[in-house]
Image (spheres, rainbow, N blue to C red):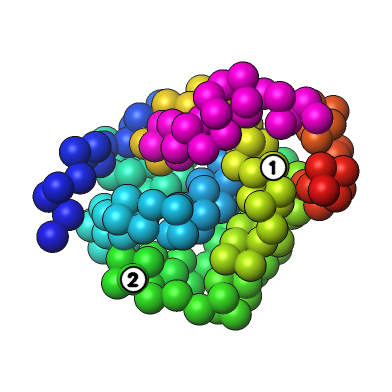
Amino acid sequence: MFEFIREEITEARYIRTAKDATGRDSTDIAESFFEQLLMLQQMRFENPDFAKKYAKDTLKFMNFSAVKPGATDLHNLASILGNPAKYPGVTSPGQVGYDEMAFKRYLRNIANGQSSTAMDRQFLLAQQKRLGIDSSFLKSARRIASDFGRASPNERNVLSARLAMSQRVDGKFRSDISKKYVSGVKKDLGGSKGMNSLVKRAGLFATGYALATAAHKLS
């Protein structure tokens, strides 16, 4: 039913093989996974057809037992988190994990066009805790993304700009969801100049600034 979508999602571009995870630590993997979850959550509202297809593609192997070249990046990041012993190239400064059953349920809801703000809040908060997310930016981003339908225009814009800028780090821009997300954000914010201007005005180039604070400054 999604044949009209020209941008086909056929394989991961960020993590395609186990070798791509070598040299990363579990915190980096966890944050990348969580960040992609937040982008997917936002796209449920702004590009529901893409979100449905991406969720469906992420579920196509039925489980998250191993990194697969034909899987989505979100699938492969989940596979690394759920099977750390298979990926000795990933250093582990701490224990991180995620709730696979809840993750599958979340993806099925997206694929089926079903949503519940209360369930989204609960799911994303629980995953934040399980993944050991300590980034003030990602915590603030989670609060806005989990209630995106009720977020103010300023909150939505700052979230979009900051997530898009974050994708430029460490090759994350290559991820299959990132390219679609960033192209949409640039269009909504008036291109790269508009996006960069928003991030600068929000003070988000400085480490540690929370999204809520930036949104307040813009209001």
Look at 55% across and 29% down and name the residue there: 190
Q: Nearer the viewer, residue 75 or 114?
A: 114
Q: CA distance from mark 1 to mark 2?
A: 26 Å
Report which residue position mark 2 lands on: 113
**Extent of the magenta region:** 179-201
Q: Residues within 10 Å of mark 2 (few under 14, many from 20)?
A: few
Q: Nearer the viewer, mark 1 or mark 2?
A: 1
Could you tell me which residue is drawn at 74 percent across and 54 percent down? 139
Q: Amino acid at mark 2?
A: Gly
Rendered-image quadrant of the N terminus: bottom left
Decide whether residue 52 is among the magenta residues. no
Tell me where residue 152 sits by quadrant: bottom right
Residue beneath label 1, please? 158
Residue 127 placement (x, y as % from top left):
61, 63
Q: Residue at x 12, y 50 (%)?
A: 3
Label 1 vs 2, first from the N-terminus = 2
Circle 1 packing at 10 Å, graded few (<14), some (14-19), many (20+), is many
User: Quick one: 67 or 166, which is closer to the camera?
Assistant: 166
Taking 118 as reference, is 68 above or below it? above
**Residue 80 percent coordinates (x, y):** 46, 46
Question: Relative to the observer, which residue lies in front, 95 or 75?
Answer: 75
* Residue 209 falls left or right of residue 169: right
Residue 109, picture quadrant: bottom left
Q: Main secondary structure of the magenta part?
A: helix
Name the amino acid type tagged 1. Answer: Val
